[in-house]
Structures are given as structure tokens and as C-alpha cells.
Image (tube, rainbow, N blue to C red):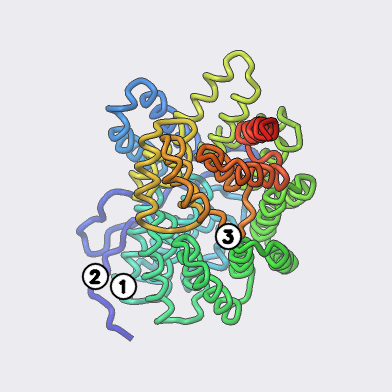
Amino acid sequence: MPPRTTDSTPERPDDDRAPSTDPEPEITGEREAGARSDSAPEPGVDQRVAAVRRAADGGRRWRALHLAGCAVLLAVAVTGGAIAVGGVQDRGAGVDAVSAAGALSPGDLARGDLDAGIASLQKHLRAQPKDYGSWATLGVAYVEQARTKGDPSRYPQAQRALKRSLGLERGNDQALAGQAALAAARHDFPGALTHADRALKQNPYNERALCTRIDALVELGRYDDAAKAADTADDRRPGIPVFTRYAYVHELRGDVRTAREALERALSSAHAPADVAYVATALGQLAWNQGEYKTALGHYARALAADDAYLPALEGRARAQAASGDRKAAVRGLEQVVARFPLPGPLVALGELYEDRGADGDRAKAGDQYALVDAWTALARAGGANTDLETALAAADHGDKKEALRAARAEWDRRHSVHTADALAWALHVNGRDEEALPYARRATATGYRNAVFLYHRGVIERATGDERGARSHLKAALDLNPGFSPLGAREARTALKDLEGNR
């Protein structure tokens, strides 16, 4: 085992400021929130949302000159709110689970209340600042908190906690796996793969590293390698995290039956509410992709019965409601989601629902949602995340088309996944470059992945290039697969298909 370094200075587990130069400074944790009702917002949410919305207001007034400054302002505002208010929700789970003998494991943390687990880790590290394993777990917890709460300001905190762990125990697999997870969360997938491989060299059975390795290979478009990695992970560490990734690899290759079976297997082994919510939501998303809205709503209901605040399930339910014709419930649900966590996906979905509804003031409301996407991407960049894919997808339909193409090209230079191929194809199309777009649209659909948006994009591009037969085939396939895939896109697909049929 490599020798430990002599740098044992603990970092403040909750503070974005530079650590003290004192050899053993006092660790001041986030202020622990008192008990609250389940319906009350987490401390810090209001500050985060307000910061994003203030930046969006500024972006609408001075978008061209002000967006770079917004990133800095958002980082300061959101990070400051996180420090001052904290992020601890005390529901009694995990708060007292940490003793002086050791902190929570990553698995324990995932099964319990995340914010309470973080508070417990902070408490433990005040008493045991040289516990490298707990620093690694805290770093991973910050990554998960950033993901689940839409708060990229946690990424720098995660980076420092993981660096502290490696400073105390060089090359420990927990911290290396945490670095892999952080890189993946920031969309640095080559880096994620490198860190995961380093962690697996130390410990071939590290579950987080095995899972992140699959994620990185998928996002890099290396699907054959991802399938092999999923088989390896299933042999070494079968369980919910591996089953869900195994399912996604098969879904990307068009094998929906195997994907569903793997997710059902995962759900049958899920007992903790967090696990049930996660897997049931994945089943809901799979059903949604196949246009099975009633089935999807059933899975989302099960997820929300386990965790009534689980954001992906709330968003998925709203999308399924919209596709089923219950637009009022869908708008209400997405408004609740973006009021707490203004993330690009639900913001665009809500904006499109406003546009499709077309009532007085709805166009302005839609514009507000699209402006918030710009603000969120600025915040994410300030947290060190790459947001080019999100920028390309949102800007192509609802923003600066030239910026969409720039972002899509930049992302394609980094990775060749079906999602980046589709984003680049569509960005080229909206910029009037359909001949260039067509090979990428074909590549996006080449694996057999059943995605109505990809089929719709390919059909529109084929129509623009004069291939009416191909356009009819793919537009019809999109609507047959998932007729409510997008409030605006599905309507445009139906109109285009009707025109094509009339020209036969």
C-alpha cells in the first residue's frame, strides 16, 4: 500500500472557502436544521431558485453581454446560500448513525436520508478529521446532492473532500471511485473512465467504480465496451446500481425486453424507499419511451409512494400526464418541479406546454422558462460542469441557433454517443445545413434505440433533403412509438406527415 502523505490538515466539509493553514483547524459544519414537515422545502432551496431566477431576469435584459457574469454571480449566490443555510433535512434517518468509530458507508448513505447522512458525516469528521474513508464518502454524497437537488455548487465541495481523502491515503479506491463519479457528473467522461479504471486497479469489486465505468463508456458512445463492462459488473457486484445500468445498455441497443426484465429484477430486490423510487422511475421512463403511458403512470405512482418528493418521478409523471391528454395536471406538476429545482429538462417541457396551450401570456411564460435554462447552464459551468449538450438541445428549438451548433459540435468532438449525434444533427438542421445533418441523424438511430425524438428529427431532416419516403417512414415511426413525445414536436410531426401523405 502506498505511504500516507503527511498532509493531514482537515478541510471544512461544508465550506467553500479555502481551508485554514492551521495544522488542525476546527471544522465548522453546516448549521443543522431543526425538524420540519415533509412538505416543507429543504433549507437552501429558496435561495438557489431565487438566484437562478435573478440571473434569468438579467439574461433576458443583457443576454449577449451578461451571461458570462451570470455564471460568477450564480456561483456566489448559490454557494453562499448553501453555506449559510445548509442542506440538512432531519427526518430522523441516519442523523445518529455515525459514531466515533466510523462514518457511514456509501451504501448506507444511499439507503438513508442524503442530507441527514451528510450532516452525520460532517459531525464525524469534526471528531475524526483524518478519516480518509469518510472524506471520500462525503465527496460522493456531495456529488449525489448536486444531482438530486440540481445544485452544481456542490461539485467544488465534492472535489475538495475527495482531494482531502487522497491526501490522507494516497490511491485509496473509495476516493478514486468518487473522483470518477464527480467527473461523470460534470460530463468529463474520459476523466471518469480514467478514474474508474484507477479505482478498479486498487479494488476490482468497487461497485461505484464498476458502475461509473459503464456510465462513461455509454456516454462516450462505446456501446460494445459498455455491454462488456455491464456483464463484468453483474458478475462481480450484482445489485440495483448494476441492474439499472445493465438495463440501459440493452435499451440503447433496442433490446427493450431485456431492459425491462433487468429493471423488474432490480425492483424485486429493492426495499429501501430510495431504491424503490429510483428503479420504479426507471421503469416508468422505459414505458414512456414506448408510448405506454398508463403503465408509466403506474410506475411513477409506485416511485412517489416510496418518496413523494423524488424529482425524476414527479417530472416523468407530468410528461406522461401531458401525453395522456391531462395537460392541466401536467402543467401543475411541472410548475411544482421547476419551482423547487429549475433544471433544463422540466423547464423546456413546461415552456413547450405553455406554448402548446396558447392562452394569454403563455408565450411570455414559455420565454421565462427558456431564459431559466440559460441561467442554469451558467450556474453549472461555474460549478465546473460541461453543459454543451444541454445548451445544444435547448437552444436549437428555443434559443440562439448558432450557439446550439457551436455547443453541439464541441460536444461531438468530446464523445460520439447517440445523444450527441442527434443533438448535432438537429443543430445543423435548424441552421439550414440538412445535407450535413443527415449522416448524424442516421447515426443517432443506428443502434436500434427506440427514441421518438430521434426518429422525428431524422424524418424532418430527410424531408428537408428531399427523401420523402424516408421522411414518411421515420415520422410515422416516431408517432407510432410515442405519439406524445413532445407537445410541440409531436404536433409538428403530425403536420409534416399529413403534408407528405398529401403529396403522394
Residue 45 position in % (x across, y down): 50, 38
Q: Which residue is mark 2?
A: 7
Identify the amino acid type marked 2.
Asp
Left-right relation of 413 to 327: left
Residue at the spot x=62%, y=76% of the render?
238
Q: Which residue is mark 1?
A: 168
Marks 1 & 2, CB-CB < 8 Å contact: yes
- Name the element at disc 2: loop
Left-right relation of 397 to 59: right
User: Reading the chain from its start, which is encountered first: label 1 or label 3?
Assistant: 3
Residue 119 position in % (x across, y down): 48, 55
In the picture, the quarter occupied by the C terminus is top right
In the picture, the quarter occupied by the N terminus is bottom left
In the rendered image of this protein, does residue 103 appear above or below residue 338? below
Front one among 130 and 59: 59
Identify the amino acid type marked 3.
Gly
Q: Kindly report the distance in space between the C-alpha atoms of the residues bearing marks 1 and 2.
A: 7 Å
- Name the element at disc 3: loop
Discs 1/3, front: 1
Residue 467 position in % (x across, y down): 56, 43
Any part of residue 233 in sight = yes
Q: Check disc 3: other Cα within 10 Å, few if <14, some if 14-19, many if 20+.
A: many
Q: Residue furthest top?
A: 360
Front one among 294 and 117: 294
Q: Which residue is mark 3?
A: 94
Q: Check disc 2: other Cα within 10 Å, few if <14, some if 14-19, many if 20+.
A: few
In the rendered image of this protein, does residue 234 appear above or below residue 248? below
